[in-house]
Image: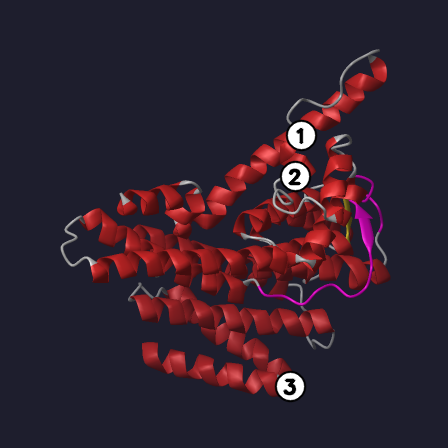
Amino acid sequence: MENENLFKEIQAYPELNSPLNFFPIINHDLEKYNSKYRNAEKSKIFSSVLFGFEKNSNDSSLLSGELIWKDNLKSNGKNLSKKLSKDLLNSKIRSEMINEFIQNHDQHDYLSAREAYLLSLVEVDNFDLNSYKINDAINCQNIFLKKLHQKLYDLFQKFRSKIVDDKEIKDSSFKEKSKEIEMGCNFISNCKTVLSVKPIHKYFELNLKSAFGKKLSLKEITEGYDPFCRSLSHLPLAQITLDKIIEILNQSFSRTPLIGLYESKKYEILSSLELSRTIFLKNKNEENSGLKFIEASLNHIKTAVDLVGYAPNRSVEIATLMQYGHISYQLAKYCRLNNFEFKDNYMYDLRNSNKYLNKISERSEVLGLQKNIDKIIEYYV
């Protein structure tokens, strides 16, 4: 009976039952929330032209955040949730509620953190974007990953304790699930590290609809678009918003390394997540998916390198050359660690990136990177 209860506990939420598939699972739920938001938008449009049309459906729980405050009835967050249930499109109230959760996250459990994370992503997916919303989503992601890691660790301890105490357990599925939870716990720990990023310090707001076709200033790039892209690349479930911003940038700055650099950084983080997941699976097909992300990162940075001047001195040019060397080295190292085929074009990129790094060799951080590249070239020669 106790064993059955353990399985019921992990089967209540898919990411506990299959933690290595965490992001696809949460993304599936996020699509439900975004669909609910779009339906609320349609209802608002209809209610403005049809007399007596009811704009809110009976089920407002997905967007009102009431699940966050289920055990905290007297909090300000509970009051905000009630207000939001009557106006599901009120972004200001939802942001206030999310911030209330962040300030008091120690008082909330894993399920509350899950709900706050989803709602913060709904706000980032909105056309009206600002620094606070992105910072809130990053904070909610960090909090949720921390609480999910602890939840998985506690579950693993329960499974392990049961296996140790009851040596007569012969059910292989019980031991397999224990191992899967342990791997998931390690994976979520790696995710916390990979997705760690500093908050955006300067306030900036952006309407993704009105920004299309607009001529951008250098100030807008440095104070808004650049920090937005850097932070959003650490939100794997906000890639659609990141792609929209990159598309806006591409209209004004298509002939600079900036676009390729952002794309490369995005795929680098996705590759790190995928590789940290597949390392536990022992499945070559799964491992190849991580390799594809690294190759995508490399291809994007190569297009950016083609736009670097002969004598690179701007910060974006220096960052581009550093990224080219870094990704070329990471790809070679990954092939070596997993006994993957090291293709001729990989070697070309290693040597070519080293030549480009010579142009900025006076920088202290370049020396260490070039040493690593030289060592791995020597390994493959």
Please name the amino acid that badge 1 sits on: Ser
The answer to which quarter of the image holds residue 324 is bottom right
Q: Which mark is residue 363?
A: 3
Depicted 2 relative to depicted 196: above or below = above
Q: Name the residue beneath numbered marker 1.
A: 60
* Residue 260 spot, x, y in % from top left: 62, 58
The residue positioned 71% from the left and 59% from the top of the image is: 103
Q: SS for tag 3?
A: loop
Cα–Cα span, label 3 and label 2:
52 Å
Instruction: Judge whether residue 214 is colored magenta.
Output: yes
The C terminus is located in which quarter? bottom left
Q: SS for tag 1?
A: loop
Depicted 204 relative to depicted 319: above or below = above
* Residue 114 spot, x, y in % from top left: 56, 48
Q: Name the residue beneath numbered marker 2.
A: 66
Q: SS for tag 2?
A: loop
The residue positioned 69% from the left and 75% from the top of the image is: 312
54 or 362, which lies in front?
54
| Residues drawn in magenta | 196-215
Q: Mark 3: give few (<14), some (14-19) or many (20+) Cα within 10 Å.
A: few
Q: Residue furthest top?
A: 51
Cα–Cα span, label 3 and label 1:
55 Å
346 or 84, which lies in front?
84
49 or 2, which lies in front?
2
Instruction: Identify the mark nearer the N-term, 3 or 2.
Output: 2
Instruction: Identify the mark nearer the N-term, 1 or 2.
Output: 1
As drawn, is 34 to the left or to the right of 148? right
